[in-house]
Amino acid sequence: MIRPTFSYKKRACRYCEDKEAEIDYKDTASLKKFTSDLGKIIGRKKTGLCAKHQRQVVREIKRARYMALMPYTAQVKF
């Protein structure tokens, strides 16, 4: 039996589409979109970023954490 073929439309990276958008460690509001509720960095499959921009986002999140602009972990309330 022949399996049906599916074609998926590849999602474009938001930073590849908008060339003027910058990834900066001081812009914590946009960097928080790439972290989970517990403060973990979300992977490429969920964020939809290309490899180049995912590496840049991870680097800037780590810089923001080092500069104490973002927390390493979230406070868990029981």
Image: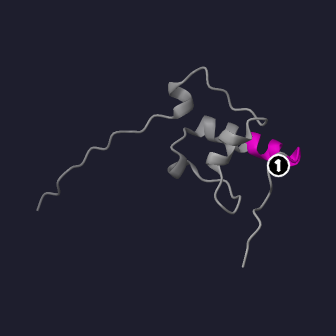
Residue 52 is inside the magenta segment: no
Most distant residue in the top direction? 20
- In percent of width and height, residue 14 lies at 52, 33
Q: How is the image coloured?
A: one colour
62 lies left or right of 7:
right
Secondary structure beneath dot 1 equals: helix
Kindly report the secondary structure that dominates the magenta region of the rendered protein: helix
Q: Quadrant of the N terminus?
A: bottom left
Q: Is residue 67 above or below residue 3?
A: above
Most distant residue in the left direction? 1
Residue drawn at the location 51% of the way across and 50% of the way down:
45
- In percent of width and height, residue 3 lies at 17, 57
> On the image, numbered disc 1 is attached to which residue?
65
Residue 66 is inside the magenta segment: yes
Specify start and end residues of the magenta stretch as a single range: 59-68
- In percent of width and height, residue 19 lies at 57, 21
- In percent of width and height, residue 38 lies at 69, 63
Q: Is residue 73 above or below residue 28?
A: below
Amino acid bearing label 1: Arg
